[in-house]
Image (tube, coloured by chain):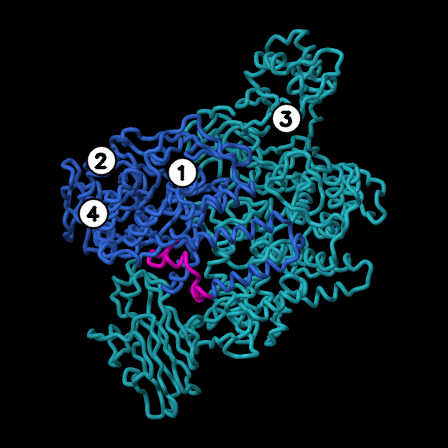
Chain colours: A cyan, B blue
Amino acid sequence: VQKPRVAVIGLAGCLWGATILTVTSAGPSPAQSPSPLIDFQKQVQPILAESCLECHSQDKRKGGLSLATYADILEGGRSGAIVRPGNSAGSLILDRVTGGVEPQMPKDELPLDDPQIALIRLWIDQGARATPTSAPAPPPWEAPLALSAPPVPALRWATWKDPIDRFVADHLATRKRPEPVTVSDARFARRAYLDLWGLLPTPEQVQGFVADRNPSKREALVATLLADNDKYAQHWMSFWNDLLRNEDGVSYFSETAGRKAITDWLFASLVSNMPYDQFVRTLLNPAAPTDPDGFLIGVNWRGETSAAVTPWMQAGQNTAQIFLGVNLKCNACHDSFVSKWKLKDAYALAAYFSPEPKLRLYRCDVAQDVYAEPGFLFPELDRSPVSDALKDRKATAAAIFTDPRNGRLARTVVNRLWHRLLGHGIVTNPDEMDGKPWSPALLDWLASDLAAHNYDLKHTIRTILTSRAYRMPAVSRRGEAPARGYVFDGPEVRRLTAEQFGDAIGAITGEWSLRPTPRPPGTPPPAPGASDPLTVGLYAREWRVASSNLSRALGRPIRDQVISSRGQQATTPQALELVNGELLTRWLARGAQRMIGELPPEPRSLFNKTVAGRNASSSKFDIDISNASRLWLIVDDFGSNAPERVLPMWADAELVGPSGAQPLSSLTPIESSNLRGGVRPASLGSSVEPVRITAPSRLVFDISGKGFTRFRGTMALENSRSEIGSTLNPQVRFLVFDAEPNLARLLPPAPDVPLPAPPVITNAADVVDQVFRYLLGRAPSVSERSLAERAIADAARPGKVSAEGLSDLLWAVLMKPEFQLIY
Amino acid sequence: MTRDERHIYSRISRRGFMGATASATLAALAGREPALARAMQTPKPTADAVIVLWMAGGMAQTETFDPKRYTPFAPGVNIRDVLSTFPQIDTAVDHIKFTKGLEQIGSVIDRGTVIRTFNAADLGFILHSRHQYHWHTGYIPPQPMAMPHIGAVVSRTLGPKNPDVPAFIAIGQTVEGAGEIGTLKAFHTGGFLGTEHGPFLIIDPQDAASAVRPPKGLTDARFKTRRQLLEKLLAQEPVHTYGSDFQRESLVRSLDAADRLLNSPSAKAFDLSLEPKKTFDVYNTGRFGQGCLLARRLVEAGARYVEVTSEYIPFVYWDTHEHGHDRAEAMKKVIDAPIAQLIRDLEERGLLDRTLVVLASEFGRDAMTEGKVGKEVKDQAINIPDVMAEPRHYGMHRHFTAAGSILMFGGGIKKGFVYGKTAEERPCTTIENPVIIEDLHATMYHALGIAPDTSYVVERRPVYVTRDGKGKAIRELFA
């Protein structure tokens, strides 16, 4: 470990520092070579240290190359590997020091002398060993740019016929693995539904699938699930939201580049299965008004910003990471110490997206006398924009990223899909596509296949899901994957995502998360004098709703950064949220009531109005009550700064009947809470005495037989104007009901649900069946059934199901690893 | 948010205990935490625990701990002529003066240090939450990686002091909600250190006990039966069938860890109703005061990092855009008694020597300057005229980054000491010993025995606990 280096203090944190090195050497290998083995440390290192380190140190890295350590030398630089163990003739380092490839190194200095060159040559030919007792170094891995079309291996096992199967069979057989078994129909169905719809299969769906005699029923199921565009999109939204940093309703109040959600476009593009190259082109070069310009804008906070994180620098970093698996974060601030990328690479990429075509470089926020023009990471694909205009530069970037010669585009996305569906990438880290794949041929075959099928992501997903590899039994994931020597022995056990977890509760109980909306989509704003919307909120799939403590504990990220994979580990905060969190408790309590048809009604108000804000003003109302026999008048505070100082009143309130108008204040409520006295005359200057209350207040009036037809007045605050401002910032809601309101849900959500509500079940045996079959995909055992039936029996009502008991059973089953894992 | 919702959020917002055992077993087993790269030299700790008293919203320094010339309210006075709206008062230390309303804190400042020259970053157009992010992580957003809260860094680096008490507890701040409140989520997080180190959030101190009790709507008996049902169902499960052993085990173990923490005797620390009424009453100036009491109880029980906030709500509490004088007066009533009592209680219990107490705010305030010196931009939300007409106009209504006050007590810090000097005339800027966040953090870390160039390896590179590892502990502050 090297000491950290000194950095210039800049505006933002530049994470400038030391390279962390781990030099690993294999076990002892007896020297068989005729000539004595070269000692790298004693013989080679000193030559490089003396002649090369001035430019190729870890912080300078000319050409992206460091020659400071053994690992650096093997890693190579911008021009790729410089050492090919065992093959000095093919090693760039020798071409450079001999002058075989210009410019000769060391540049502008005396060349190395012949014995020095001979020593390096011999060291390489002996296998470029770390120490004389180490094994020869493995051949360097260099991620190619273009796609190859690898030949599909010969058949190894009779039923492993499709290309993926053959690549995997080849991989396994050469590692002496026997032909794997495949999982049962029920388990396959669970995986497929969760991976394509994000939902558990219903008991009927599992049953139907298991009973199906069609030999290609698995392929048929995958096709059917993929054909449901809406459900496919609802599930895959979370995957893309994480990657593209898309989050609804989050702003950091930038005055110049506010955050802009791309939800509508993203959803539509998933529904239509937009070809991936077009998808990327549209993200990089949004032109139509409905296009996702929010993606390039990025995450910006109000105020001045470090040069390394301007919207265009973010765009450069994010596009490289998301679409190409290249990490440019270090070198957005300074030349990278851990990769070949330079500061100017980050700026050149950003220059496709910046207002000005020439970008001044800032090194750790200090302006340099150097400017970058648009330039791509891989110069082979570089091309000049038609003009300096931003639209032309963006169009050029879009064209380069999706150039058919850019194999990284397809390789990166198929690797992401594989990683998502099988729990471990073909390249382990989906953000570092320079890493070595466990099967380069499989990766390139999948990528070529995607390109050959018009970048149809559903095609690749289908290909993966119908493969034998996907049907293999799941294997345990134990911490971080080994850097080397990974063998694909089957999909890794995965956790349900926060969205899958929540949607499972919604699906089985019919009780979904709520997405608050000012008013349901498609409804016009209320006319003056009309009520505010009577319903607030829609039941929604989990991805649609804002994150909660529960969903964040279960791994839903704050999407300020690109998230390629979510944490899979069980943590204590997560367990506390599940065991002790009120959100899950309330959800299950209502869900259980709904399952057995005992959810209390949630009547809608006749009329409601919000009096809120620093400029809160009163609201007149005049409503039809001719069918009411009782009136419930509710006033609720939903967030005033000092609720106890807010003075709401039903001002000028009158009931109009056959004998004229009668002041509300002249009637005696049959129930009342939080009435308050008042000495001041109502500020509205009316003759009618107001009914004064403090929130929360509930007044009930019996008006049966009185023939009232209208209820009118003003919903108002008695506070003075100067109090109402930022001191109180009142948030008060007035509501009128003609049926007993549910105080927990004064404004019930619209009744629509994301999936058809499951039928109400009241029989204990059926309830237990439903819970096990739906959540676990199997029937309960005899002992499980007896435990569960006992748990949900209602002691007070023999033969009935207790909603409390059922919510506890739901909880217990949801806590089971059998539920929480995909295996 | 209604009071009910607030109430509910306070219960559902518990993010996490992280007992040593839990943390060691779960996180380590998962093997997914960034590796710690220890610094070359680790300072000898002078404190084992930290309490941060967060004056959210920008506490006006000239109205609190850095008194300047007093100008009483009078219609017709130009706000340019107003530096302090409170007269100066004496404290327990001859050379330290505060403003009226801080008599109690003044009476304990002989146990602590006043820093008068906190210089917040100049970021242009002010956004409170962005400065709060900077204060709490040492980094200015946006950042390409999720930066952890300083409490999460302390939690990860030192671990819990008592395995049964969460290492990082944040009291008093709602982070759920629309608008700027929602942005506070961005730094109330373990960030790249993982959720295991995120804050255990308690919104309402009086409700803290519910964080360690069965959730509302569930009796103790039912809570136990439910848990037993799970145990029995797990026992029925065919072995080795569902999921891998490792993941199955870690899920079950995490539930056990949660249970153990809920049932620990230390959980009593959360229950303010166990505090003698007399003490409770001294602290009880509202949620902040109760939070101070809770902080004391939690540190006694072994918490590592506790933050109590006066709460950030735009335009409320210390975020004075009008009625500045009245608001400052009210806020001083809220903080004065409980903070002084906290110091006395810690001292009486022998804890002050090893507990670092830090009072701070994201920046200061001024009547004229907006942001950095030389800038005078009118408030966009609330119009305050140049010449005062009514009490609404009297006070410090703009944001000021060139000086702000910090108090530090205990944990090896000097007693009765003043650090930094500000000008006596507007703009009352720093003229001696500016303190930037890197150095303040380095000082706090130094007290805890954490070197400022301690780093974590994230995406193959080191990320330092102070920016670039360059924070310098202010040695003059230590006794």
Residue B189 coordinates in the image, percent (x, y): 45, 46
Element under disc 4:
helix
Instruction: Give the camera-side residue of A355 and B415.
Output: B415
Q: Nearer the viewer, mark 2 or mark 4?
A: 2
Residue highlighted by disc 4: B79
C-alpha gap between disc 2 and disc 1: 26 Å
- What amino acid is labelled 1 in the image? Gly
Between the residue at mark 3 and the residue at mark 2, the CA separation in whole angstroms equals 55 Å
**Residue B320 visible to an observer of this rendering:** yes
Q: Which mark is residue B138?
A: 1
Dot 2 or dot 1: first in sequence order is 1
- Mark 4 and mark 3: Cα distance apart in space: 65 Å
Q: Do marks 1 and 4 share a chain?
A: yes
Q: Position of residue B474 (x, y in %)?
A: 31, 30
Q: Secondary structure at mark 1?
A: loop
Q: Which residues are magenta?
A: B202-221
Residue at image point 68% right, 7% down: A114
Q: On screen, B433 above or below A507? A: above
Disc 2 versus disc 1: nearer the observer: 2
Marks 4, 3: nearer the viewer: 3
Q: Is residue B117 shown left or right of residue A194?
A: left
The three-letter amino acid code for the residue at tag 4 is Ile
Residue denoted by label 3: A75
Q: Dot 2, how many residues are within 10 Å of its Cα: few (below 14), some (14-19), or many (20+)?
A: many
In the rendered image, residues at marks 2 and 1 fall on the same chain? yes
Mark drawn on residue B415? 2
| Residue A329, image x, y percentages | 53, 35
Helix, strand or loop status at disc 2: loop
How packed is label 4: few (under 14 Cα within 10 Å), some, or many (20 or more)?
many
Does the magenta portion include B209? yes
The chain letter for the residue carrying disc 4 is B
User: In the rendered image, is residue B368 in sight?
Assistant: no
